[in-house]
Image (spheres, rainbow, N blue to C red):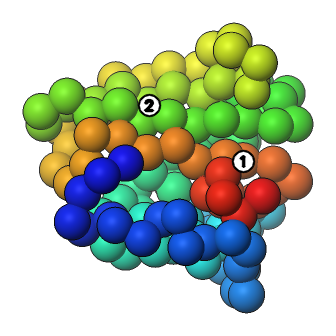
Amino acid sequence: MTNEKLPDLHQFTGSEHWYRHALNRAVVYTDGAKYVADKAGAYWLLDEIALAQCGVAAVKAEAFQVWTLDVDGSRATLTCGDGNGGTVYSKEIAFTDFPAPGVTIWFTDNTILLPTEY
């Protein structure tokens, strides 16, 4: 992802803090995921990932998940993959002001994190 609002994603190679998600208390997220949410105004993205863990059976069944947000203008597609190229879940986002062409976020062990934090 290249954008002046999110230039430093590569700097996250681990996390010093874990933040408990407010709506799904079983889920935590890392410093890198919080950075994306803060800088992009995208706590809704963390909400989508956390809530899918309890609301979408196919998502919950995957121990390792690759979440991809692909932005096209003011619309986007959020996709959950199984890490092996298979799509588990997809959702159209009718409006977003996400400041970059997209982002990839992983979910494993009840943790939302950036790929570089794994």
Q: Residue at x 21, y 66 (%)?
A: 4
The residue singled out by tag 2 in the image is 78
In percent of width and height, residue 15 lies at 71, 78
The residue singled out by tag 1 in the image is 107
Classify 14 as above or below 61: below
**Residues at circles 2 and 1 in contact by the CB criterion of under 8 Å:** no
Q: Is residue 1 left or right of residue 87?
A: left
Frontmost residue, 4 versus 83: 4
Label 2 or label 1, whichever comes before in sequence order: 2
Task: Name the amino acid, label 1.
Answer: Phe
Q: Quadrant of residue 55?
A: top right
Q: Quadrant of the C terminus?
A: bottom right
Task: Name the amino acid, label 2.
Answer: Leu
Frontmost residue, 20 versus 32: 32
Q: What's the distance in space between the residues labelled 2 and 1, CA to CA?
A: 14 Å
In percent of width and height, residue 70 lies at 35, 31
User: For mark 2, does the 10 Å Cα neighbourhood hold few (<14), some (14 to 19), or many (20 or more) residues?
Assistant: many
Q: Residue at x 51, y 26 (%)?
A: 79
Q: Is residue 85 left or right of residue 35?
A: right
In percent of width and height, residue 113 lies at 66, 59
Classify 110 as above or below 32: above
